[in-house]
Image (tube, grey):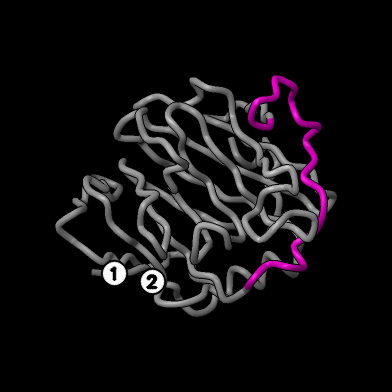
């Protein structure tokens, strides 16, 4: 079973649902009820190269988590092929969001050399429909919003808000990496459960006005 690419930009990047019995189509979305792998057939060079060239990105999600007990970084959407090789990931750990963004000043896993990456405050998520947006511009400024309100991003074990900077550029993005929803491509042990209504990836940094 395939999920069609509705971007109408270049060649389509349809996603493959490995086990259709693990999902259900609902009004406006896809409910992931059991662990499953949903992935592009290969690397999404169109998207990866566009972001690498612009040095900007916005990743927009409309989701509804199934529960707030999901831990060990349950992957909602990721461009990666393994636990330690990714371009970008938005994940859930219980009631907060994890953001991993690869630059030439992070390792290949999108975390800095102190083994840290931005997270939202605990209690960010609930079980209703959630509009999540992550943006990074060419100057390295990042921000994330939930339902139109900016989140205070911190690094794990630190109460201090990061200075809205995630340094480096996207020159080391791997254009061969696939797009995956709800899991990690290899290992399949970081499954996320919930409903996906929209995944949109832009090679530009949308501002708050454009998001809301």
Left or right position of 69 against 177: left
**Residue 89 located left or right of residue 5:** right
Vertical order, 44 against 206 (above or below): below
SS label for mark 1: strand
Does 12 sit above or below residue 92? below
Q: Which residue matches tag 2?
A: 14
Q: Secondary structure at mark 2?
A: loop
Frontmost residue, 103 versus 112: 112
Measured from the top left, where is residue 192 in percent x and y?
36, 45
Mark 1–mark 2 distance (CA, rounded to whole Å): 6 Å
Residue 158 image point, x, y percent = 70, 24
For label 1, the residue is 2
Query: Where's residue 166, x and y in %?
Result: 77, 45
Q: Earlier in the sequence, mark 1 or mark 2?
A: 1
Q: Mark 1, residues whose alpha carbon is within 10 Å: few (<14), some, or many (≥20)?
A: some
Judge from the rendering whether residue 207 lies leftward or rightward of residue 86; answer left or right. Answer: right
Rendering coords of residue 67 (x, y %): 31, 30
Q: Nearer the viewer, residue 131 or 103?
A: 103
Per the image, is 135 magenta? no
- The quarter of the picture where the C terminus appears is top right
Question: Which residues, given as a range, are shown in magenta?
Answer: 155-174
Nearer to the camera, 54 or 85: 85
State which quadrant residue 99 falls in: top right
Task: Give the numbered dot on residue 77.
Answer: none
Quadrant in the picture for residue 201: bottom right
**Residue furthest left as drawn:** 21
Say which residue appears at 43% left-offset and 33% top-offset. Answer: 130
């Amino acid at each position: 079973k395939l999920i069609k690419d509705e971007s109408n930009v270049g060649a389509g990047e349809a996603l493959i649902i490995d086990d259709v019995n693990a999902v259900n189509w609902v009004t406006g979305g896809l409910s992931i009820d059991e662990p499953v792998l949903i992935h592009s057939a290969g690397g999404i060079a169109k998207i990866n190269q566009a972001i690498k060239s612009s040095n900007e990105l916005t990743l927009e999600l409309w989701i509804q988590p199934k529960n707030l007990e999901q831990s060990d970084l349950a992957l909602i959407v990721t461009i990666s092929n393994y636990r330690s090789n990714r371009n970008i990931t938005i994940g859930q750990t219980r009631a907060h969001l994890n953001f991993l963004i690869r630059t030439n000043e992070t390792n290949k896993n999108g975390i800095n050399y102190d083994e840290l990456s931005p997270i939202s405050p605990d209690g960010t998520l609930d079980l209703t429909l959630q509009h999540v947006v992550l943006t990074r511009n060419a100057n390295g400024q990042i921000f994330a919003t939930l339902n139109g309100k900016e989140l205070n991003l911190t690094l794990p074990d630190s109460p201090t808000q990061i200075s809205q900077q995630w340094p480096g550029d996207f020159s080391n993005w791997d254009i061969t990496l696939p797009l995956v929803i709800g899991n990690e491509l290899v290992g399949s042990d970081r499954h996320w459960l919930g409903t996906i209504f929209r995944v949109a990836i832009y090679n530009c940094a949308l501002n708050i006005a454009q998001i809301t």
